[in-house]
């Protein structure tokens, strides 16, 4: 019996080798004499194909080999992954990749505090003068990521993570889609006034429970979705497991039907209004006041997007990502490239922009700010002077906050030739904005929000010491939600996110575990604030408002130390 098995395996092995050799010879003949697409394969038949294989896997596997080149340290990336899983994030002996000079240093106190002596108050108030100001419970929020650039499942994970973690979430320019209602629960007639609701009924409800029992939740919902909803609209609905209904906002319902206050079972959403006006436009693409007010029924404040670090052009969503659901949300045709204008339609001048901000403040009664990239002190001074003029002359339209994205801020779809060529590093930009606004005596009229390459608690503390009131993070939350940094986010050609987070490809999306990743998103935020408290304790600082420039130093690439960071920046920035 043993001899027979051994004989069979031996025969199978040699047959396999013979078949493999025949395939290799056939491919080599095809490459050398038949194909005329690749020059390399004519000279190096078959062997040359390894070049294309290694080229294909270079980016997805890049992060596993060599040192980190984008952030200061690979250890920062590992920290995010660890704390998202609620691990300690501690390391032994020393960093595997020490942060090089130049860098900012945190000044420790001679008599540090214990962590429990540091205030838990991380709240930030926006728009004190508005009828409905927004008080964020956290100094950290998830930065702008559009539903569309992110998969529906990814958006739901972020929404649930933000709701459970009690931190704000920026809608991104793709607007407030149905997926932002993931934590919302239907409450009968009250919600029916502004929602399209499709009930499972007794029979479909029975099949749903059976499928969920013997399969899983994802399978059961998808089968019910296929049975009950129009194929072209099925992904525009979200499922309420308690009420056993599918629902979506009915944007055609009368304005008076929409909630007067943001529902308590939704996260704090910052609505980003871009040059495409998605979520606030009519069928012809023009600004629609009533549509904007309907969107703001579910949002805490508005961010007018003028620029993003790596994307000074209008937002870009390639055709593969413009699914029927995304087309429905944005009011465009599906599967066509969606490129927004470079210039915001109400920003031909700073005066016009601020007048439009005043219009939004009046319509929403909520805070309104702008998102910019700063290229120079002179560049920002134009905004600051207009702010001062409006303050002195009591003209409406002073933004309630300014979001500053660094020149190295990210985008999954941006021209290579603009990346790192437009805009200052976020720390330089925040310092300029804070200093200029103080110089003109209007710093107390608005909040500064910083975004770009902020990952770990030390990044948060240093950026706040330089003048930021609030931090928006994109990559850190992406990593916590399962991103492996394969750099396949664009959706163009073979570029499809392998984990299902930043793709509209249904096969890859199917593997994304919404509830698990939502927990990791919330854990990252929790441990981020926990780390901030630890640093504040070491600094001897009891409250976040005590984080000032005097609490940090700077060491340049030559080892020279600047205990007065103002002096360092004055030498660095010649206005």
Image (spheres, rainbow, N blue to C red):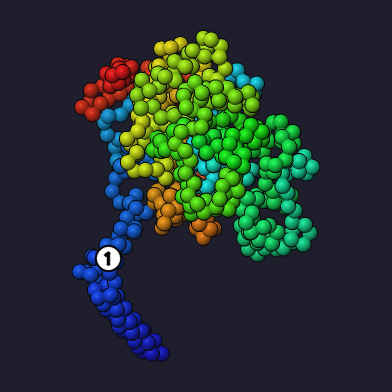
Q: Identify residue for label 1.
A: 38
Residue 148 coordinates in the image, percent (x, y): 52, 47
Residue 187 seen in the current view? no
Question: Are there few (<14), some (14-19), or many (20+) residues within 10 Å of tag 1?
Answer: few
Say above or below: 201 vs 300: below
Residue 479 coordinates in the image, percent (x, y): 45, 45
What residue sits 37% from the left and 17% below the top?
550
Q: Is residue 254 left or right of residue 311?
A: right
What residue sits 29% from the left and 79% below the top?
26
Q: State the quadrant of the C terminus.
A: top left
Say above or below: 3 vs 488: below
Residue 541 coordinates in the image, percent (x, y): 45, 20
What residue sits 52% from the left and 42% below the top?
146
Q: Quarter of the image holding residue 202?
A: bottom right
- Element on which disc 1 rests: loop
Residue 112 coordinates in the image, percent (x, y): 42, 22
Q: Is residue 133 left or right of residue 25?
A: right
Q: Residue furthest front?
A: 284
Residue 392 seen in the current view? yes
What residue sits 51% from the left and 9% below the top?
392
Number of numbered markers:
1
Nearer to me, 526 or 537: 526
Nearer to me, 152 or 329: 329
Nearer to me, 370 or 140: 370
Say above or below: 533 vs 149: above
Q: State the quadrant of the N terminus.
A: bottom left
Q: Is residue 366 left or right of residue 554?
A: right
Nearer to me, 405 or 339: 339
């Amino acid at each position: 019996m043993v001899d027979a098995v051994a004989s069979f395996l031996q025969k199978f092995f040699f047959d396999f080798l013979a078949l493999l050799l025949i395939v290799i010879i056939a491919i080599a003949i095809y490459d050398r004499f038949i194909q005329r697409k690749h020059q390399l394969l004519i000279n190096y038949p078959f062997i040359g194909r390894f070049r294309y294989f290694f080229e294909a896997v270079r980016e997805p596997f890049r992060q596993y080999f060599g040192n980190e080149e984008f952030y200061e340290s690979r250890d920062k990336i590992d920290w995010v992954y660890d704390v998202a899983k609620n691990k300690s994030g501690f390391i032994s002996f020393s960093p595997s990749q020490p942060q090089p000079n130049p860098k900012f240093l945190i000044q420790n106190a001679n008599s540090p505090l214990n962590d429990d002596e540091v205030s838990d108050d991380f709240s930030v108030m926006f728009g004190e003068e508005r009828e409905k100001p927004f008080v964020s419970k956290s100094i950290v929020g998830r930065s702008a990521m559009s539903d569309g650039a992110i998969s529906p499942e990814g958006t739901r994970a972020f929404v649930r993570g933000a709701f459970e973690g009690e931190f704000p979430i920026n809608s991104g320019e793709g607007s407030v889609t149905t997926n932002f209602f993931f934590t919302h629960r239907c409450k009968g007639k009250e919600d029916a006034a502004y929602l399209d609701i499709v009930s499972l009924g007794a029979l479909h409800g029975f099949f749903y429970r059976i499928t969920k029992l013997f399969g899983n939740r994802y399978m059961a919902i998808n089968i019910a979705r296929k049975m009950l909803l129009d194929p072209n609209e099925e992904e525009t609905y979200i499922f309420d497991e308690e009420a056993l209904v599918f629902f979506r906002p009915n944007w055609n319902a009368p304005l008076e039907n929409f909630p007067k206050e943001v529902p308590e079972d939704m996260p704090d959403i910052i609505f980003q209004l871009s040059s495409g006006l998605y979520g606030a436009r009519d069928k012809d693409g023009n600004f629609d006041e009533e549509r904007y007010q309907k969107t703001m029924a579910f949002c805490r404040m508005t961010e007018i997007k003028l620029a993003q670090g790596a994307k000074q052009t209008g937002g870009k969503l390639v055709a593969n990502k413009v699914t029927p659901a995304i087309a429905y949300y944005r009011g465009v045709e599906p599967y066509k490239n969606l490129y927004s204008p470079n210039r915001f339609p109400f920003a031909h001048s700073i005066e016009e922009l601020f007048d439009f901000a005043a219009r939004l403040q009046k319509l929403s009664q909520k805070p309104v700010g702008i998102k910019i990239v700063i290229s120079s002190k002179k560049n920002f001074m134009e905004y600051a002077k207009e702010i001062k003029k409006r303050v002195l002359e009591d003209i409406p339209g002073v933004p309630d906050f300014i979001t500053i994205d660094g020149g190295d801020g990210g985008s999954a779809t941006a021209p290579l030739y603009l990346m790192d060529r437009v805009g200052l590093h976020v720390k330089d930009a925040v310092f300029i904005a804070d200093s200029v606004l103080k110089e003109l005596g209007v710093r107390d009229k608005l909040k500064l929000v910083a975004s770009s390459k902020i990952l770990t608690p030390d990044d948060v503390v240093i950026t706040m010491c330089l003048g930021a009131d609030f931090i928006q993070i994109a990559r850190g939350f992406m990593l916590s939600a399962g991103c492996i940094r394969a750099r396949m986010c664009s959706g163009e050609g073979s570029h499809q996110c392998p984990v299902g987070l930043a793709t509209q490809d249904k096969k890859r999306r199917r593997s994304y575990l919404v509830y698990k990743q939502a927990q990791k998103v919330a854990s990252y935020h929790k441990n981020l604030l926990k780390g901030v408290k630890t640093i504040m304790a070491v600094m001897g600082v009891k409250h976040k408002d005590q984080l000032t420039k005097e609490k940090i130093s700077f060491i340049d690439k030559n080892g020279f130390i600047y205990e007065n960071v103002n002096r360092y920046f004055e030498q660095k920035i010649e206005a």
